[in-house]
Amino acid sequence: MAELTGDYRKFMDKNYLGAWDVPDDGDLILTIDKAARDDVKNERGTERKLTIHFVEDYKPMILNATNSKAISEACGSTKVETWAGQRIAIYTQKVTAFGGTTDALRIRPFKPKEDKAFCDNCGSLIEPHEGYSVNKIVTMSRAKYKQCIFRMETRPHN
């Protein structure tokens, strides 16, 4: 049996993305599949909330005004129907809320920098996969195989 590691909240039955889902070593880069209004259960009952769902296999994220504004800045539009297909960078920030300090999800108000990498063996483009950026895939591969098998180029995401 594999040993569990990481924040205990990752292992709870949570329906929506939380700060514990963001990697400790950087932003979580995801692609928006759609915006929706979901019925969200909380201590006050059930409320309809604006959410975004992702192409990658991640839980949806409940949006507040701060994160909605950041997405609109990153995507260049306040219209939620234009957000599909846009990549965003999610990070955590300490905030004072609910009577204490907690980690909150935040979205960077600009498009994430994307790295392009090509396999040195076959020349194929390496793509982001399941929330891992190209840079993270390259770093993990270098650590595993102890050699550089990629050629990197950095570009802003379009």
Image (cartoon, rainbow, N blue to C red):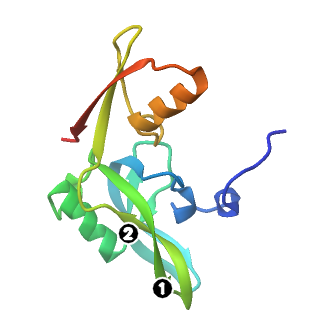
Pick out the residue farthest to the left. 76
20 or 121: nearer the viewer:
121
Residue 36 point in image, percent of width and height: 35, 61
Q: Amino acid at mark 1?
A: Thr
Relative to 71, 63 lies left or right: right
| Above/below status of 139 relative to 93 | above
Image quadrant where one finds the N terminus: top right
Please tell me whether mark 2 or mark 1 is closer to you in this view: 1
* Tally of numbered tags: 2
- Position of 73 relative to 147 (above/below): below
The residue singled out by tag 1 in the image is 96
- Look at the numbered disc 2 and give the secondary structure of its residue: loop
The image quarter containing residue 120 is top left
Q: Residue furthest front?
A: 147
User: Can you tell which mark lies on residue 123?
Assistant: none
Residue at 56% x, 87% y is 100
Q: Which residue is mark 2?
A: 63
Whether residue 113 sits left or right of residue 5 in the image: it is left
Instruction: Sort mark 2 into few (<14), some (14-19) or many (20+) by Cα contacts within 10 Å.
Output: some
| Residue found farthest to the bottom | 99
Quarter occupied by residue 49:
bottom left
